Image (cartoon, rainbow, N blue to C red):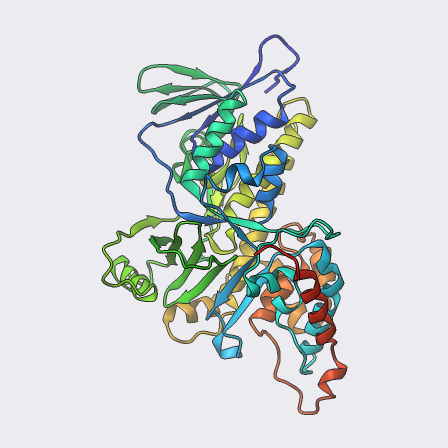
Amino acid sequence: MNSNTQSNKPLHLVILGGGTAGWMAANLLAKKWSTHNIKITLVEAPELGIIGVGEGSTPSLKRFFEMIEVEESQWMPRCNATYKVSIRFDGWSPESGVNSYSHPFFSQVDTFTAKPFTVNCRTRRLGLDTHTQPDDFILNGLLAKQGKSPIAPANFPFQMEYGYHFDSHLLGEFLAERAIALGVTHLKEKIIAVEQHSNRDISALITSSEEKITGDFFIDCSGFAAVLMQKTLGVKFNSYKENLFNDSAIVMPTPISETIPVETVSTALSAGWCWKIPLQNRFGNGYVYSADFINSDDAETELRRHLNCLDSSEQARHLKMKVGRLERHWANNCIGLGLSQGFIEPLEATALHLVQISLEIFIDQFEQVGFTDKNRNEFNIELAKRFDGVRDYIVAHYKLNTRNDSDYWRANRDNTHLSDSLYQLLNIWYTCEDLSKEIERQQIGAYFDSMSWHCLLAGYGAFPPLAQNQPNKGDLYKEKKIQQFLQGCALNFGP
């Protein structure tokens, strides 16, 4: 592929599929390459809607809107969005004595309390009794407890990091409007065939109305169908089934509470877990489970019982998930994006994060070599590492569980299909070596950093039994000073 954006003919990028991934791509590409001779077309089937579930994000979505120059006041009300400062995990490790823990998002101000937290974790790993509750050391953890938004007062000298909860259908609609305003061509057509050049590069998409949509480069956002990457180019799909058992989900809304929380709650159930995501107008709920351990009817009953709505007339929707990733994320003149490139279940809200990171890496590497495929191999290596790195962090949630109420949780704990990277991280933790140095050595901090791993492992109470002889507890940490510091920081944050 040798495209020259300086020629009279524009480089034509064709995105197959809308949804959040497709419209994120359209917006970011149109914004980043507005000064280049590039044309962008997004084509989606008119009868296919977006699954409008309540969805959460990581702080990367905040950066996305900054990059496309959209204010929170412009998109949040339109999408029933709320702020998200933390994820709380209920019931994942009850036998450790820790029935609930939080993974707050880490901000600049937390550099002052990160060291006391990691030192306390190492002290506890040595068998000494000390305080290791993650949300007591991170400002967003305190804001979650107080129900405050992460919007800092004007004189606050540190940058705050936070995510959002939103209606994914409404977000897709909003992003579509923005992309079209930026000059993206939107076609509502059903694709019935794909044409290729002799070298197997994609040349055109053929619609049901016999229109031919030609392009120079294609982005596959066709969901789990992966029409271009798998069905046309034959890229292999690497399943994560042996690592992550969940393959199904049930979603349904419930009324919103008078006070809207600022965190996602992930509650362990008998064959998976349930999310609870607060939007402005409702809670979005979903049960992510393994069909190998529970059937869909029993799963729906369990979800309804958990939500106290067994007699509700509200309809639940049943979804299937394809967990894994493409062996190559860039093949010929096409990249996969969103569900078509891979999916690592909703836990920790990594789906849109991976879409955005994939886009940013692609934009940088494609432009760097004059809009050619010279960096294709580097792109594939980097994306494979990122997906596998995120997978390992999610796998650890299941491997470390201490539930004994079902075969599902026991099978997850007994699962030996762990990567060498995850084995080494757990070994470093349990032998009381330096976890931060190991994360740095493996160069995986860009996926989940040392603080995230400490939150997970400490939150699960993954520690040895306490030593018999304990020094004075007050000599081991300065909890009161840390709490006073965080309380002072949170004093004037938003309601």
The quadrant where residue 378 appears = top right
Could you tell me residue 138's position as x and y percent? 66, 63
Residue 41 seen from this side: yes
The quadrant where residue 367 appears = top right
| 414 horizontally vs 463: left or right | left
Q: Residue at x 74, y 77 (%)?
A: 477
| 81 horizontally vs 135: left or right | left
Vertical side of 323 occupied by 172: above or below: above
Choose between 360 and 343: the one closer to the eye.
360
Q: Quadrant of the C terminus?
A: bottom right
Q: Residue at x 47, y 68 (%)?
A: 90
Number of numbered discs present?
0
| 263 horizontally vs 37: left or right | left
Vertical side of 100 occupied by 258: above or below: above
Q: Quadrant of the N terminus?
A: top right
Q: Residue at x 61, y 17 (%)?
A: 3
Could you tell me residue 424's position as x and y percent? 64, 63
Could you tell me residue 124's position as x and y percent? 67, 78
| 413 horizontally vs 154: left or right | left
Vertical side of 371 occupied by 175: above or below: below
Vertical side of 296 occupied by 222: above or below: above
Choose between 143 and 97: the one closer to the eye.
143
Could you tell me residue 131's position as x and y percent? 66, 76
Q: Residue at x 63, y 56 (%)?
A: 493
Residue 380 seen from this side: no
Q: Residue furthest bottom?
A: 469
Choose between 83 and 274: the one closer to the eye.
83
